[in-house]
Amino acid sequence: MKRITTVLAVALASGLLFQYCASSKSKKTAAAPTTFEGHVLPLIQTKCAPCHIAPDGKKKHYNTYDVVKADIDSMIRRVQLQPNEKGFMPFKKTEKLPDSLVQVFVKWKADGFPVK
């Protein structure tokens, strides 16, 4: 009887000890945050130029962090409009930005507006 109790105690202790162990494959790594310099600015430079990029742009310049952060809600709203709706961006285009690109702006805001 003592032997069975000892074996059960060892088994229980082993189970408790290893319950928090997991392989690295099962752990989910957090997605890297979307940053202004790494994601948002390059998107603006390719999809919003030349209108919103200094010095040639005739519209509000969106090549600085503070300006983009201040206008992010308007930017997200406008790129989500349909091409026939007033205020649609990108201006003079007949197609919307792909959702994956719109999500760059949305995720940057959700991530707390990191710069780098």
Image (cartoon, helix red, strand yellow):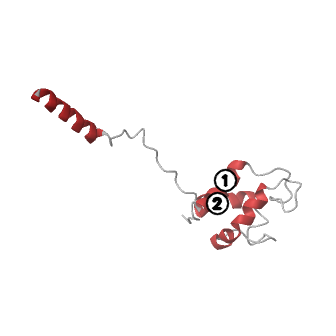
Quadrant in which the N terminus appears: top left
Residue at figure coordinates x 10%, y 29% from the top left: 2
Report which residue position mark 2 lands on: 40
Question: Where residue 18 sits: x, y (%)?
Answer: 28, 39
- 18 and 76: which one is in front? 18
Q: Secondary structure at mark 2?
A: helix
- 78 and 8: which one is in front? 8
Left/right of residue 25 with respect to residue 43 in the rendered view: left
Q: Secondary structure at mark 1?
A: helix
Q: In the figure, residue 107 lies in which quadrant?
A: bottom right
Marks 2 and 1, the one that precedes in the sequence: 2
Residue lying at the far left in this picture: please name it: 2
**Is the residue marked by circle 1 packed among few (<14), some (14-19), or many (20+) residues within 10 Å?**
some
Residue at figure coordinates x 80%, y 59% from the top left: 89
Question: Where residue 75 sits: x, y (%)?
Answer: 74, 63
Residue at figure coordinates x 15%, y 31% from the top left: 5
- 66 and 30: which one is in front? 30
Question: Where residue 33 sits: x, y (%)?
Answer: 54, 57
Q: CA distance from mark 2 to mark 1?
A: 10 Å
Report which residue position mark 1 lands on: 103
Question: Where residue 91 sits: x, y (%)?
Answer: 84, 60
Residue at figure coordinates x 60%, y 63% from the top left: 36
Q: Are marks 2 and 1 in contact (CB under 8 Å)?
A: no
